[in-house]
Amino acid sequence: MAYRAQPREPRPVQSNPPVDPAFLLKNLGKPVAAFKSAGDVMGVYPLKNVKVIASYSWIEGATPIVAVPGSPRVWKNIHVTRVPADTGVQMIDENALRMGDKSPLLPLFVAIDSLHKDFQYGDLDLVTDRNSLRKLLRFADGAAGEFRIDVDLANKTCLLTRREEKNSERIVGFRGFSQEYEKAATRAASGCEKASSHHRIISYDFGGIKVLLRFVDEACTERGDEADDLLASFSSMNIGRVSQPVAPLSRAPIASASGLTVRLTKPTSLVPQSNTIEIKTRASHKIMDWNEVYPQLYLSQTAHLYLAKHERGSFQRVEKYQLNGSNLRDYAVRTEKSMGKLKVLLDAILRAVRKLRTRDGIAVPLSLVCQGDTLTLYRRDASTGYPLGKEILSKFGGVELPSGSKSPTILRK
């Protein structure tokens, strides 16, 4: 059954709790550039050449373990009628939480290097999490909250590291039913029974900006049950129905003691992009904010949104939407306009970051901080935040690794 998304007014300013200024400005020096949200932008910049690159699942354990390529949880296609309220710990940024003082970007590179031989990192302009692009998109669209994103330059590639005041929090009081509903409506894929989350890495061309993007993939449909018309809608974006084959492990993913264990899972093929699902739960009396949700789907090219409405934990049958569905066309058009503003902003950020080097040509650690209606680029004190290290920087050229570097433990299943 198809559902029609109801039109809404332009996206309101986010009402998130205020962020501690001490966190936003910790270890930062003087500002070096400032950005304003753009007005209307001429031209449309669709995402082109969308490719699935790699994926991994975090495995519960005392030490950091990722399963590569792992798998998202699989949609069971049943009517979940009731679940208890969420309790326990809610993850905010699991990559940062599990990596400790190491770079949260490390698992991204481990996953890619485990599946690809000689991946061309140097061709990229931007490496980022979807969360960081969503924050920048809100700012570009005139509806930003307060946030910080650390910025590092590797040769010509700009790497954005997500920063949060806290990477997890214990649920106190009522927080909804989303975690419990997801557990009830999905099942763990074979080999990922102890997985806590699944992360997917895609690349695309955004108006000439070569982007490598990581995002949380909550679920997927069973492989082989997609409709032919959905397949056709994705063909223009170079997203195939068939799982993309990947190369066998050909080199150590990360040099030096990253503290990360890699488990290679079977099959080594990746879940097709056309099978990906975002799951949302909402009280039945609350209207979905499509101006917020649709850009989330679009940035990661997530194929499906499953909306589960409830009354105090008693759930109706799920409403299913498709990214390219006619019932979301109004939001697709609106998002195209917003993406134009984001493209202008990213161009300005890339220009500013690439200019900031020492007299010896060494890149300067930086941070983007949004406060009010201004996005400011600051110098960041050296060796603060999450240092990338030579193991990551060397992938982009210009940095040699020390001899005797160690690789993470790799376990074959």
Image (cartoon, rainbow, N blue to C red):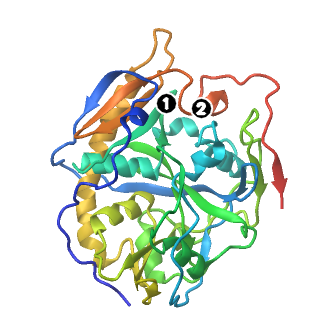
Kindly indicate the quadrant of the structure image that contains residue 334: bottom left
Q: Is residue 284 above or below residue 27?
A: below
281, 271: nearer the viewer: 281
41, 392: nearer the viewer: 392
| Residue located 34% across and 77% down the image | 325
Where's the N terminus, which quadrant?
Answer: bottom left
- Which element type, helix, strand or loop, lies under badge 2? loop
| Residue located 51% across and 62% down the image | 171
259, 37: nearer the viewer: 259
Residue 299: percent from the left, percent from the top?
A: 40, 57
Dot 2 alpha-carbon crowd within 10 angstroms: few under 14, some 14 to 19, many 20 or more: some
Q: Is residue 100 above or below residue 400?
A: below
| Observer able to see residue 223 | no
- Which element type, helix, strand or loop, lies under badge 1? strand
Q: What mark, if any, has residue 388 been given in the picture?
A: 2
Dot 1 alpha-carbon crowd within 10 angstroms: few under 14, some 14 to 19, many 20 or more: many
Residue 204: percent from the left, percent from the top?
A: 45, 52
**Of the residues shown, which amino acid type is indicated by label 2?**
Leu
Q: What mark, if any, has residue 152 been given in the picture?
A: 1
Where's the C terminus, which quadrant?
Answer: bottom right
273, 179: nearer the viewer: 179
